[in-house]
Amino acid sequence: MEPHMIEPDVVSHDGDSNEIQKKKKKTRLGERFRGFLPVVVDLETGGFNAETDALLEIAMVTMNMDEDGTIFIHDQVHAHIEPFDGANLEPAALEFTGIDPYHPLRMAETEKEALSRMFKPIRDAIKHHGCNRAVLVGHNAHFDLGFLNQAIRRSGVKRAPFHPFSCFDTATLGGLAYGQTVLARACGAAGLDFNHEEAHSACYDADLTAQLFCEIVNRWRDLGGWNPNEDSAGQ
């Protein structure tokens, strides 16, 4: 059976009831996606296998929305991550990202330390907007979601705020809106400056992905695809 979007009475990964899911009055952003909060996530890793390869860097971007229905970037949190015990590090991946996992100035945290710290503002945003869960927004989002889910399982972090399998993919959205699926090209088509020298940093890529997501959502509203004066949560 094909999985469906989990509704507001979902439970967290550990099976316990999640207190952030109590009914609260939704903000405009909370209404926009039926009580699910979009949060942009970008990761840098030591390879392509979420089960065996190291998670090395993570950035998360929260967003907000004004009364006219314009979505915009609110804040970003970031962490350098220590490779977990036994993690694989592919030389080609490290050359691509330029990351030295054991550089003393990285100020890296364990997966559990980083996720526990970074999930706090996400939970706060979920509560503020009256949402039920965060939904990961990413460019080729299932790659990021796979690594994030594995890190959550390894670290044993409780009450993970992210939906375990639903996501918004800006590669797909960029293809729909601009005919471009590569992040740099989709940003160019959207009129966003893209600096190739800064790319492949989690902070930079998360910020550009968030800008692209906001451009597409706002453009759809301007074209009449979503009316901010209607309560989408009730549809």
Image (cartoon, rainbow, N blue to C red):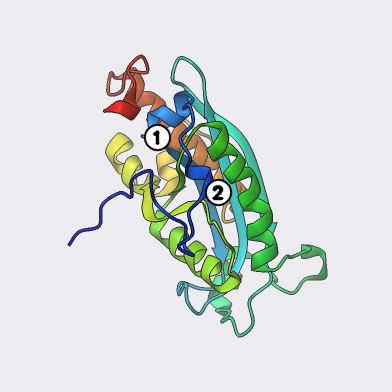
Percent from the top left, x then y, of residue 37? 46, 39
x%, y% of residue 34?
36, 34
Q: Residue at x 52, y 70 (%)?
A: 153
Q: Report the side of 103 relative to 38 (left or right).
A: right
Drawn side of residue 101 relative to residue 176, left or right: right
* Residue 68 image-quadrant placement: top left
Q: What amino acid type should be assigned to the residue bearing mark 2? A: Asp
Badge 1 vs badge 2, beta-carbon distance below 8 Å: no
Image location of residue 50, percent across then percent down: 47, 72
Q: Is residue 102 left or right of residue 191?
A: right
Residue positioned most to the left:
1
Query: Image quadrant for the C terminus?
Result: top left
Picture residue at 65% right of the left edge, 52% below the top = 118
In the picture, the disc for residue 205 is: 2
Above-or-below relation of 23 to 40 = above
Q: In which quadrant of the rendered image does the N terminus lie? A: bottom left
Picture quadrant where residue 8 is located = top left
Q: Which residue is mark 1?
A: 189
